[in-house]
Every structure is written in C-alpha cells, then in structure tokens.
Amino acid sequence: MVKNFSFGFSNDDIEDAADYEQPMDVGKPPSTLEAAEHAKSTLVEPRRHTLQELLSTLPSKISYTTLRITATHGRSITLARRELFDIRAQIMAEDSGEDSTLIAGLSADDVTPSVYEGGFKTWECAVDLARLLLEEYGEEEGVRWEGCHVVELGAGTALPTLTLLRLTLAHPSSHPVRFTLADYNAHVLRLATIPNLLLTWASHTGLLEASDGDLDITPELLEDFLQDLQSRNIFFDAISGAWGPELTRLVKEQNAFCGDGSVLVLASETIYSPTSIGVFTETLLELLSLPPGSNPPAPGSTANPAVSPAATTRALVAAKRVYFGVGGGVDEFLTVLSSTDGVAREVWATEGEGAGVGRVVLEVRRELRG
C-alpha cells in the first residue's frame, strides 16, 4: 500500500512572502520501497495535450489571487494564479466517483506517490526560481533572449513559466518562443497550469482589475487569448505523465527548438523522493541533449553539432537541501548526477538569510567528455 505524505506548511498554499520562508518538513514520510513498487505498475503514460483541449473544461468563471515576485535588483512583477478553493470547487463538481486521481487533490496529503504529485499548490522553491528568472531575464528594456524552448518539469501552478510569459508578453522576442509544460497529472494541467497562463495573459492585457477576484470565461475570451499568443510567436503545449524516455520523445517530437537553438529546462521541488531522482536526472539530461535534425559537425571538428555559437542549453533546478523524512534532496541529486555527463553549480542559495532549511537553485549543463 502506498503511503501518502504531507509537507509541513501551516497554510494550504503560498499566499505571501511569509509563507515560503517556512521550512518544508514531512509529517508522514512514505515507504520508499512501497512507493517504488507501486510506481512500476501504475505510472501514467505520457500524453500530449493542446491548449484548446485543456481550456475547454473551464467553468464560466474562475477565481484568482495574485503573488508579487521581487528580484534582488528591485524589479517586481505580479502574477495571477487560480485560487486553490476554486480548483477544489471544480473538482467536487466534476467528481463522479469514477476517477480517484481527480479527488486525490482534495485530500489533506500534499502528495500521493504515483497518483497525485502536489501540483495544485504553489511551493516555495517555485517562488525562488521565479525570482531568479526575473533577475536573469527581466530588464526594463526587454527580455534577454532571442528565441528559446522552455520546458518546465513538474509544472504544477507554473510560477517560473508564468514569470517568463509575463516578460515575453511585455517585450516580445524577435524569434518564436515555445513553452512545454509537463506535469504528472493531466488534471493539474487543465485545472491549474493552463488557467494560470490565461490569467497571466489577462493580467497583461488589463482584464484583471483587482489583486483578487473573478475572470469571466467566454468563448470570445479564449479565442482572443489563443490568437494573441500566436500573433506574438508564443507557442504552448502540455504533456501529462511520468518522466522518462517517452516524455522526452514527446518534447522533442515537434522539433520545436526555436530561434538560435536555446533550451531552458526548469524544475522546482522535483527531487524530494529518492525513488524518482534517477529517472528525473535521466529525463533532465536527455532534454539538455542536442536538438534533433541538426547538421553534423565537419570532420575533425569538436563543435557541438546541434546548437549555434549563440545558443545556450541549460537547466535550473530549485530544491531544498534536504527533505526531512523522505530522503531526497540536493546531495542525493548531485550523487546521481556525478555518474553522468551532467555538471551542476549553485547559482542561488538562502544561506545567510536565516530562512531555516536551506534552499538552492542549481544550474545544470551537459559536459562533453573525451
């Protein structure tokens, strides 16, 4: 039997700066052996979803709240997210008793391994990563990239992607930008992830008049949303299901690496379980491999055959140093990474801020070895 577990936040969801300063603890750690055995037989097969498909089940109105993200250099943006109570209300309205994965998000447990992976809530390391992205990519005169494929693993409420979307809407890139959002649960994608994209766009276009409230969902609004993204060369798709070769195949299937071939993989709170760190690392490194369909290098050349000299290919992984009671954390991830061609360095950390359990953001790249 798989045991559920709960991270020790005092509130249901992050609502302000004070919440994500609390240490994450585990009240009821899972049996990693039982979780691993269960996962082998019940992992959800990856599947691609379109925006139209995921938007089609939204109710006539969704409730939202906002969260301010502030970078250390002082610039801030406000991100709108669907209210957790509103997500729960839709789940209860849809529940027919036939889909246990749908109602798993209503339980007091934050995670049910291989069933529900906590995507309806906003976790503190996602805020850390959003701050870092605002600092690195956000400038008053524009976003510092020329086309990119952004892939967020374990997207959930997708704060890091929302940050980049908000910046891209304000300062469009001269090349297409593609976002691929991956989460274990299709329900999370349609009830939280994609509605948050819509809310981010609505906020940018002036449709949200207050810091919290409701947005009326009409066919005309959804059509305007889709058409405006296309006119700005912003493209989205979503993938549900487990990490692994099939997920990476779906990400690469469209040969969607934009502009100069840059790839940015984002992940937050994804290395808490030792049973999944290995497959997460494999998936991460495969996404950092060379884009398909590229010209091979000239004979004798040591140049990367897939990426132009201006391109960058990297991942940013935000995590706790240790997840008490579970066994995962940064050290365990780095141990797995050390046996591969991946290399990591800390680009942000909480040490010295008196923030309790340490949190970091790691930059991960693949290193060509002779």
Image (spheres, rainbow, N blue to C red):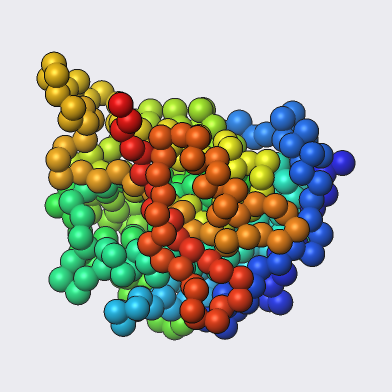
Residue 95 picture location, percent across and down: 75, 51
Above-or-below relation of 232 to 308: below
Q: Is residue 162 left or right of residue 357?
A: left
Query: Where the N terminus falls, by quadrant?
Result: top right
At horizontal 81% and vertical 59% (from top left) the residue drawn is: 28
Query: Where the C terminus falls, by quadrant?
Result: top left
Above-or-below relation of 244 to 17: above
Residue 301 picture location, percent across and down: 14, 24
At horizontal 30% and vertical 43% (from top left) the residue drawn is: 313
In this view, the residue farthest toward the right is 1
Residue 6, quarter of the rendered image: bottom right
At horizontal 46% and vertical 82% (from top left) the residue drawn is: 211
Residue 285 picture location, percent across and down: 43, 37
Above-or-below relation of 15 to 317: below
At horizontal 21% and vertical 35% (from top left) the residue drawn is: 307
Residue 206 picture location, percent across and down: 33, 75
Instruction: Give the number of marks.
Output: 0
Q: Is residue 86 left or right of residue 268?
A: right
In this view, the residue farthest toward the front is 370
Answer yes or no: is residue 139 visible. Answer: yes
Closer to the camera in the image, 15 or 10: 10
Closer to the camera in the image, 201 or 299: 299
Closer to the camera in the image, 300 or 101: 300
Answer yes or no: is residue 85 visible. Answer: no
